[in-house]
Amino acid sequence: MTSAHHPALTALLAQFPGEATLVQVLLRRRAGGFELRHADDAEAADDALKLVTAPELRALAQFTATGAFRPLKSAPNLRRGWRVLAAGEADLETALHILYPGALADWHAARAATPPVTHYRAFTERQTGMYRVTTMLEDAAAERVTRAGCDRRFCLKQRLWTVGALAADSVAGKSLVPCLEPCAILLELARKAARIEQEEKLTLALAPSDGATILAALEAALGQPDSGVREGDTGSPANPRRLLLTLEKLRPLFDVPPAGKSAE
Ligand code: SF4
């Protein structure tokens, strides 16, 4: 059996001596090593799952079941139907890195007395060029962007960074794997949101019933399994994160609590 001597992996295995769920992956000790499989396949018989190698796992982690590229590996769209056997810690570390790059190190870092978290304001302050505009979002708008961009329907990392009065995510609400600073997809959504804030506004009078219909239509669109829009394409009004961002803006107007606060 090979050994990685990776302190983060050693700490994880010590904390979860039997099995652990990392985002959507179930890690189990098996005779002679470890096994990884999709957590939703926990009860599947071994021979019902395809045994894959590390290169096959890499290809599998790149695309969703419908063939869409997965720019964010922590998105809740990892394919099912496979399992990986790791002969030792080095193989296990390789497989985990393929599935969730940097997750082990981040999990370990987050356990420090002072976790290396970079919050929205500090993160955007150091942006230059086209992303500098993200500093201009006021707290309420930055909170909306964060609720929309980091919603669990798009990402299962436990967001530890915050902005304004927004609380960090819980492990129960997301997963064991922490997010220590805004990612590229969140930053792109913030850039687009800042540009939208700068647009001249329309004035629209709506009856509450019309508002309810708009909210229902946005929820229905968000419920579609595949929007056909690239995750990072925030220029598309049909981008699911933009749909949720608009929902976040409209909900207070119709007395509906924001996401995660039991709307209806
Ligand atoms: S910034 Fe949000 S969407 Fe991006 S990895 Fe972190 S929690 Fe996920």
Image: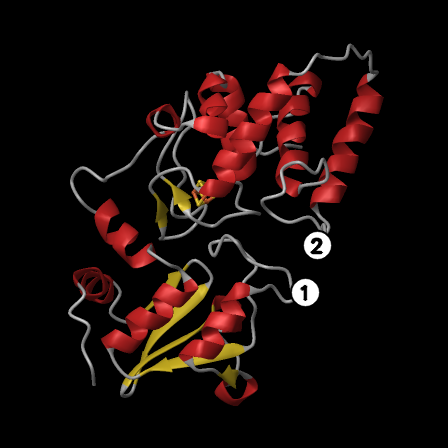
Identified at 37% across, 82% down, the residue is 85
> From the image, which quarter does the N terminus lie in?
bottom left
Would you say 143 lies left or right of 198 here?
left
Q: Amino acid at mark 2?
A: Asp
**How many marks can you see?**
2
Classify mark 2: helix, strand or loop. loop
Give x and y (percent) for residue 173: 45, 45
Residues under numbered marks 1 and 2 in contact, where contact means CB atoms less than 8 Å apart? yes
Disc 1 from disc 2: Cα separation: 8 Å
Would you say 110 lies left or right of 103 here?
left
Identified at 28% across, 36% down, the residue is 117
Residue 150 seen in this snapshot: no
Q: Is residue 98 above or below residue 128?
A: below
Residue 66 disc label: 1
Q: Is residue 205 above or below residue 4?
A: above
> From the image, which quarter does the C terminus lie in?
top right
* Label 1 or label 2, whichever comes before in sequence order: 1
Give x and y (percent) for residue 180: 33, 41
Q: Toward the viewer: 45 or 111?
A: 111
Q: Which residue is mark 2?
A: 226
Classify mark 1: helix, strand or loop. loop
Density class for disc 1 (Cα within 10 Å; few <14, some 14-19, many ≥20) is: few
Residue 118 disc label: none
Density class for disc 2 (Cα within 10 Å; few <14, some 14-19, many ≥20) is: few
Identified at 80% across, 18% down, the residue is 208
Give x and y (percent) for residue 177: 36, 52
Q: Is residue 227 above or below residue 185?
A: below
